[in-house]
Image (cartoon, rainbow, N blue to C red):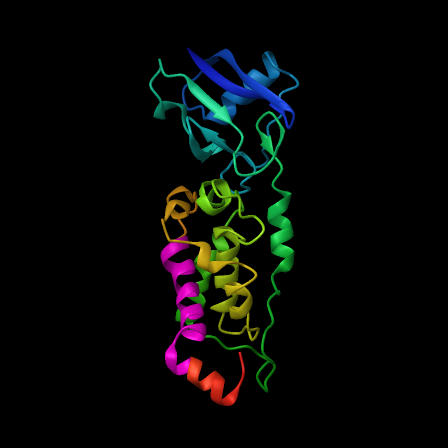
Amino acid sequence: MTMRTFRIWRGDATGGEFKTYKQETGEGMVVLDVIHRIQAEQANDMAVRWNCKAGKCGSCSMEINGKPKLACMTRMNLYHPDETITCQPVKTFPIQKDLASDVSWNYEQNKKIQPFTPKPRDPDGKYRMSQADVDRVQEFRKCIECFLCQDVCHVLRDHERHDAFVGPRFLIRLASLDMHPLDTADRIPKIKEEYGSGFCNITRCCTEVCPEHIGITDNGIIPLKERVVDRFYDPIMMLKRKLFGGC
């Protein structure tokens, strides 16, 4: 067993502070394991959100030594035995208590998006898609909604444009719908105006923190931005709209 030092943020929306804890750790432990031990043995009232402990629910998102991570997938052996490990809630959303942030804003954004709207079935009652089209959107379905991409997005984190930008997680959801071979809804105008695709300047910080290794920027956001440009800024399309109308 090795004694490790943790600095954990304790408090709520009204304020708080970092508190230091010494805790014995064993081989193979992850950060969430140690937090649970501290919670059980030293701080019974400490709030931490978690569920599956397998990197698939996204619940235990937090910032560990300043980097957004899943606590259940962050191994203790990544850090030097003498290194203090600092844990704090994700910064982009309001703090509820201790390591838990209020991420309900994200679910409100999801409600704004027009759901999957498939075309009619073929005469034999079946849908048909090419495998290439299926493969293209399958990647986006791996999202576990940990909201780490939302946490590092500078539009939300630094500029606090929650009023005008849905963030990378929901641009990925929009991409999964817009690129789906069966979907018929036209979301491009809202992607430009209501969802704020123009705010993203493709820094790729969202892609870097994704625990599912989704190509958020290159495979989702950039193609969406290109579709917006084709629709609203292509000179030929602009002339066509003037002559024949339409969006």
Q: Nearer the viewer, residue 69 or 162?
A: 162
Looking at this view, is 142 or 46 the one in front? 46
Q: In this view, does 59 lie above or below 125?
A: above
Q: Where is residue 64 in the image (x, y as percent from the top left)?
A: 44, 28
Question: Between 1 and 120, which is closer to the camera in this rendering?
Answer: 120
Magenta-highlighted residues: 215-237
Whole-percent x, y for residue 208 in the image: 37, 44
Q: Is residue 174 above or below residue 233?
A: above
Name the residue furthest left.
Answer: 80
What residue appears at the point 45 percent right and 63 percent down from the top-left corner?
137
Name the foreground residue: 27 vs 143: 143
Quadrant the N terminus occupies:
top left
Q: Where residue 200 sits in the image (x, y, percent)? A: 43, 54
Locate residue 3 relative to residue 36 in the image: left or right.
left
Vertical relation: 199 (above or below) 39 = below
Horizontally, residue 203 falls left or right of residue 142, namely left
Please give the count of numbered marks on the rendered protein.
0
Q: Where is residue 25 in the image (x, y as percent from the top left)?
A: 45, 15
Magenta stretch containing residue 168, yes or no? no
- Res 183 seen here: yes
Report which quarter residue 194 is drawn in: bottom right
Can residue 153 be seen by looking at this rendering?
A: no
Q: Which residue is drawn at 59% across and 11% down?
A: 42
Q: As drawn, which residue projects farthest toward the bottom?
A: 243
Q: Residue drawn at (59%, 80%), measured in percent from left and top?
A: 121
In this rendering, the answer to whether 230 lies above or below 68 is below
> What residue do we see at 40% from left, 20% from top?
27
Tell me if residue 231 is in the magenta stretch: yes
| Left or right: 146, with 111 as reference point | left
Tell me which secondary structure the magenta stretch mostly adopts.
helix
